[in-house]
Amino acid sequence: MRPSRGQVREDTRPPARVDARSTDALVAAGQDASLRGQHDEARQLFERAFHGLNRDGSQATLSSSLLRWIARAHQLGGDVDAALDCVAAALAVAVVIGDHAGIGHALNHEGILRCQQGRLDEAERLYVLARGRATRGDDVKLKAHCLATTFHVPKPKTPAARAPGTPAPPATGGKP
């Protein structure tokens, strides 16, 4: 049935599959675009690669990675909500397939996003979890990154501790 004038015909065909060589080329082009600072182009290339993956689960690890790279492109483009959605999807895929390193990378990326939002306690918790997954997944680079990042989470300033037996400063009742 043909749509009437002014109506848009919805395409119900599945997206064309991309062969492995094309997927690799799209990923390489996406990574190159990202390095050049072309985040929107990188995201589009990663999305094309993602939509071309086999649906039989044989490329689940690559699927998780692509979702994280798409998240990174969203993050660098300023769309933190979209980045968090992609990270959640990447984490879900990694959990389903039992990919400890993939789980660690997703947790680490979420930690970075939470740190940018100023949610420092949550970011630090995520970095610690990511480091544990990196250890289980034998991902030395991720483990080192998580360890370094944990120590670089800015800490909120707290009043200096008093020595034992030192009296507390007098309350000013809100007056200077």
Image: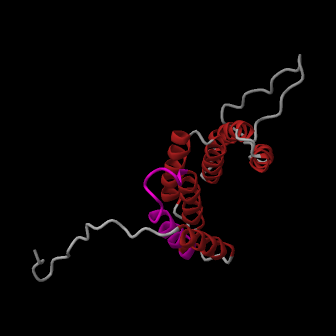
Point out residue 160 in the picture as x, y percentages from the top left corner: 83, 33
Along the viewing direction, whichever of 18 and 148 lies nearer the viewer:
18
Residue at left offset 85%, top offset 20%: 167
| Vertical arrangement, residue 169 with respect to residue 72, above or below | above
| Vertical arrangement, residue 114 with respect to residue 71, above or below | above
Point out residue 1 in the picture as x, y percentages from the top left corner: 10, 74
Judged left or right of residue 140, residue 53 is left
Q: Residue furthest bottom?
A: 5
Magenta stretch: residue 137 in it?
no
Counting the numbered discs, the total is 0
Along the viewing direction, whichever of 149 and 53 lies nearer the viewer:
53
Judged left or right of residue 171, residue 18 is left
Residue at left offset 66%, top offset 35%: 174
Point out residue 14 in the picture as x, y percentages from the top left corner: 33, 65
Along the viewing direction, whichever of 41 and 54 lies nearer the viewer:
54
Point out residue 130 in the picture as x, y percentages from the top left corner: 68, 41
Residue at left offset 11%, top offset 78%: 2
Residue at left offset 64%, top offset 40%: 100
Main SS of the magenta segment?
helix
Judged left or right of residue 78, residue 32 is right
Magenta stretch: residue 44 in it?
yes
- State which region is magenta: 41-60
Quadrant occupied by the C terminus:
top right
The colour style of the image is: secondary structure
